[in-house]
Image (cartoon, helix red, strand yellow):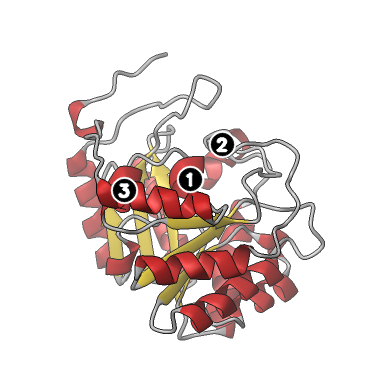
């Protein structure tokens, strides 16, 4: 069943010289961004602010999530120059805050953990004043691999639960809700002062009660920050939108989440996990 897209979800097209400069720099350094690979609706706005969320470890994912626009082809060979090139881009763009994420690489022995750590190391050398947010896969719950990542001392550790547990079989068949929550719990236990963050897409058929239950689960593990945005179907091959959540409902969710103890909440139709992350 097709659900008509409301006016509030329409994105204004933006361009400009800074947008062109960012895209050129990313291309010159052979980098990938989640802005392009995930077809983010805010990418032109972010480019015009001189920011981008870098996606490392290639652009082909080993998971089969039904909402994501990232390709599921044969994983690529890891580029050993990528950490240095990401650091060059961060320095060149003069960023104050950078977000580094990746595709899931279940095919790698360390699932990319050491590559994440190397990216942090190179950014610290090239741009020591930058705060670093890592948006990581679940690492199959392997605590040794999570240790490698958090011991590199990112400023924010982000891992998205994406949706309510009742929809995982449909939306994220290779993921486990409890494993994702436990990852955030483990990080907070090992690094109590490290800020943790998670995010959800809405409009997949979840109920308000289910959404609030996720808020509670995240607060039980002392998750500090939360992002909520509208799911947008990348193509007809992806899971359809069940409903478009109103801006008023997003505002209500924000107030409820803040009242439950989240320190920062971004909640609006076009919010994504790294949208205005520098303000968190």
Q: Which residue is mark 3?
A: 19
Q: Which-is-in-front pick, marks 2 and 3? A: 3
Residue 227 placement: quadrant: bottom left
The spot of residue 60 in percent (x, y) is: 66, 43
The spot of residue 258 in percent (x, y) is: 26, 65
Instruction: Confirm or deny contact between disc 1 and disc 3 (CB under 8 A).
Output: no
Q: CA distance from mark 1 to mark 2?
A: 8 Å
Labelled disc at residue 182? none
Instruction: Confirm or deny contact between disc 2 and disc 3 (CB under 8 A).
Output: no
Given residues 168 and 227, the one toward you in this image is: 227
Classify 151 as above or below 3.
Answer: below
Q: CA distance from mark 1 to mark 3?
A: 31 Å
Instruction: Confirm or deny contact between disc 1 and disc 2 (CB under 8 A).
Output: yes
Q: Which residue is mark 2?
A: 171
**Which of marks 2 and 1 precedes in the sequence?**
1
Furthest toward the top, the residue is 1
Q: Residue at x 38, y 53 (%)?
A: 22
Q: Residue at x 17, y 42 (%)?
A: 248
Furthest toward the right, the residue is 109
Q: Which residue is mark 1?
A: 163
**Which of marks 3 and 2 precedes in the sequence?**
3
In the picture, measured across the screen, residue 199 lies left or right of residue 170, that is left
Classify 238 as above or below 43.
Answer: above
Q: Which-is-in-front pick, marks 1 and 3? A: 3
**Which of marks 3 and 1 precedes in the sequence?**
3
Considering the numbered disc 1 on the image, is that residue within a helix, a strand or a loop?
loop
Considering the numbered disc 2 on the image, is that residue within a helix, a strand or a loop?
helix
Q: CA distance from mark 2 to mark 3?
A: 33 Å
Q: Is residue 260 visible?
A: no
| Quadrant showing the N terminus | top left
């Amino acid at each position: 069943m097709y659900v008509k897209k409301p006016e509030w979800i329409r994105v204004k097209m933006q361009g400009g010289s800074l947008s062109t400069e960012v895209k050129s720099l990313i291309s010159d350094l052979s980098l990938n961004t989640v802005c392009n690979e995930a077809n983010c609706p805010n990418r032109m706005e972010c480019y015009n602010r001189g920011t981008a969320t870098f996606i490392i470890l290639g652009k082909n994912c080993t998971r089969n999530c039904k909402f994501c626009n990232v390709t599921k082809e044969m994983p690529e060979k890891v580029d050993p120059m990528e950490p240095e090139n990401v650091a060059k881009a961060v320095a060149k763009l003069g960023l104050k805050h950078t977000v580094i994420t990746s595709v899931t690489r279940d095919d790698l022995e360390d699932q990319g953990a050491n590559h994440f750590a190397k990216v942090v190391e190179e950014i610290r050398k090239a741009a020591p004043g930058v705060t670093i947010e890592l948006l990581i896969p679940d690492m199959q719950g392997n605590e040794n691999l999570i240790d490698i990542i958090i011991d590199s001392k990112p400023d924010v550790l982000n891992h998205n639960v994406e949706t309510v547990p009742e929809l995982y079989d449909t939306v994220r068949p290779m993921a486990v809700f409890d494993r994702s929550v436990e990852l955030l719990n483990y990080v907070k236990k090992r690094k109590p002062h490290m800020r943790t963050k998670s995010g959800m897409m809405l409009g997949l058929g979840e109920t308000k009660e289910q959404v609030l239950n996720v808020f509670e689960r995240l607060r039980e593990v002392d998750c500090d920050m939360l992002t909520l945005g509208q799911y947008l179907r990348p193509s007809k091959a992806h899971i359809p939108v069940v409903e478009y959540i109103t801006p008023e409902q997003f505002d209500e969710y924000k107030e409820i989440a803040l009242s439950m103890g989240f320190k920062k909440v971004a909640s609006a139709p076009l919010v994504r996990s790294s949208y205005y992350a520098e303000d968190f």
